[in-house]
Amino acid sequence: MKYSKKVMQNFMNPKNMGEMKNPDGVGKVGNPVCGDVMWVYIKVKDNKIKDIKFKTFGCAAAIATSSMITQLAKGKTLEQAKKIKRDDVAKSLEGLPPLKMHCSNLASNALKKAIEDYKKNKNKK
Ligand code: FES
């Protein structure tokens, strides 16, 4: 399987990887295809994603797509961040092998869940 240079860069040197203390929202999703798991943590200020981190037990493509999605989402409004699709991520990574497209669902779905979690927490306050 051949990965693009961008995928390799994001896999070897992922951005925003790790856990976040006191996040405003957390999204967790499992990949039904391979059983891998992904967490996305966000901090929100003025309706924008101020900080974002991810943690995963996924493959190289899952790590690279998460690294990319956190970079795409940072600084965006919640509405803009929710619209980031796996195809946008794949394009920013200069393509993903078709067999690995399902891995990129993890990051975008976890981000959407983190945003929903943030909204739920906010309504509780
Ligand atoms: Fe599981 Fe890619 S094979 S996330």
Image: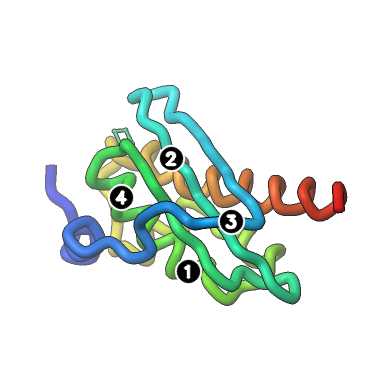
- At label 3, counting other C-alpha atoms closer than 10 Å, the crowd grade (few under 14, some 14-19, many 20 or more) is few
Q: Nearer the viewer, mark 1 or mark 3?
A: 3
Distance from Cα at disc 4 to Cα at disc 2:
9 Å
Q: Amino acid at mark 3?
A: Asn
The earlier-in-sequence mark between 4 and 1 is 4
Q: Position of residue 70 (x, y in %)?
A: 45, 63
The earlier-in-sequence mark between 3 and 4 is 3
Q: Identify the residue at the far left of this view.
A: 1
The earlier-in-sequence mark between 1 and 3 is 3
Rendered residue at 38%/63% (across/down): 16
Quadrant in the rendering for residue 5 = bottom left
Q: Identify the residue at the far front of this view.
A: 21
Name the residue carrying label 3.
22
Q: Position of residue 109 (x, y in %)?
A: 55, 43
- At label 2, counting other C-alpha atoms closer than 10 Å, the crowd grade (few under 14, some 14-19, many 20 or more) is many
Q: Nearer the viewer, residue 101 or 72?
A: 72
Name the residue carrying label 2.
38
Q: Nearer the viewer, mark 2 or mark 1?
A: 2
State whether residue 77 is above or below residue 4: below
- At label 1, counting other C-alpha atoms closer than 10 Å, the crowd grade (few under 14, some 14-19, many 20 or more) is some
Q: Position of residue 11 (x, y in %)?
A: 22, 56
Name the residue carrying label 4.
63
Task: Give the side of residue 3 with respect to residue 47, left or right.
Answer: left
